[in-house]
Amino acid sequence: MPQPSSSPLRPTRRRFLFSALAVSVVGLGGWATHAYIRRGWSGDALTPSGKATLSDLTRGVMQAYLPAHGPERQALLDAWVLALEDGVRKMTPWVQTQIAALLGSLASPPSRLALTGDWRELSRLSDAEVAQLLQDMSLSHSPLIQLAYRSMRNFICLNCFSQPSLASRLTRYPGPLDI
């Protein structure tokens, strides 16, 4: 019995599977390259992409404590990002790699879509929209997405509230009185 010839107009099953595999490998390679370029931590400092993503996430997590507008708001966000960067710097290299991967995933549109359900850049969203994306992550049925949410939220809250100068600016509580 003669074998059917394979051509682009009449593909065989083997040719179809090979083409699907090739497209998948190219797509996965492109995504991995993009996520590596957009990673959040490099060497001993946040990358510009990591700083922007962390600042946007901080806006969503800490929105209740931020002033509505003005230079005080931006100064507070900048101080938080510096505190967060210092917090990452004090962690082990393994944890730094995990934070870099998470920030890179949230900075990359395809993986941000998988984690948050939204393609849009976080910088283009309002504080309430970022908070809603984070809320959706916390209510996800996927344990991996919930873990990503909890780890970023806990990291941001821990570093923001553990800095005495920042915590007093947030809560307007000067600390215990000297008696």
Image (spheres, rainbow, N blue to C red):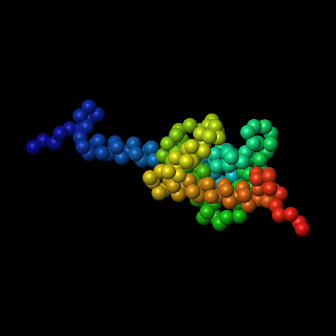
Looking at the image, residue 152 lies above or below residue 66: below
Q: Outermost residue toward the bottom?
A: 179
Name the image quarter holding the C terminus. Answer: bottom right
The answer to which quarter of the image holds residue 159 is bottom right
**What residue lies at 64% left-to-right and 49% top-to-bottom?**
61
Q: Closer to the camera, 173 or 102? A: 173
User: In this picture, is 116 found above or below 152?
Assistant: above
Q: Quadrant of residue 175?
A: bottom right
Determine whether, in the image, residue 52 is placed left or right of residue 139: right
Pick whichever, 32 or 6, lies toward us.
32
**Residue 131 coordinates in the image, percent (x, y):** 60, 44
Image x and y of residue 105, in percent: 55, 49
Q: Is residue 85 left or right of residue 144?
A: right
The residue depicted at 34 percent of the width and 43 percent of the height is 20
Which quarter of the rendered picture does the N terminus lie within?
A: top left
Query: Which residue occupies 42% across, 47% down?
Result: 25
x and y, in percent, of residue 168 in the image: 80, 55
Where is residue 146? Give x, y as percent: 51, 55
The answer to whether residue 158 is seen in the rendering is yes
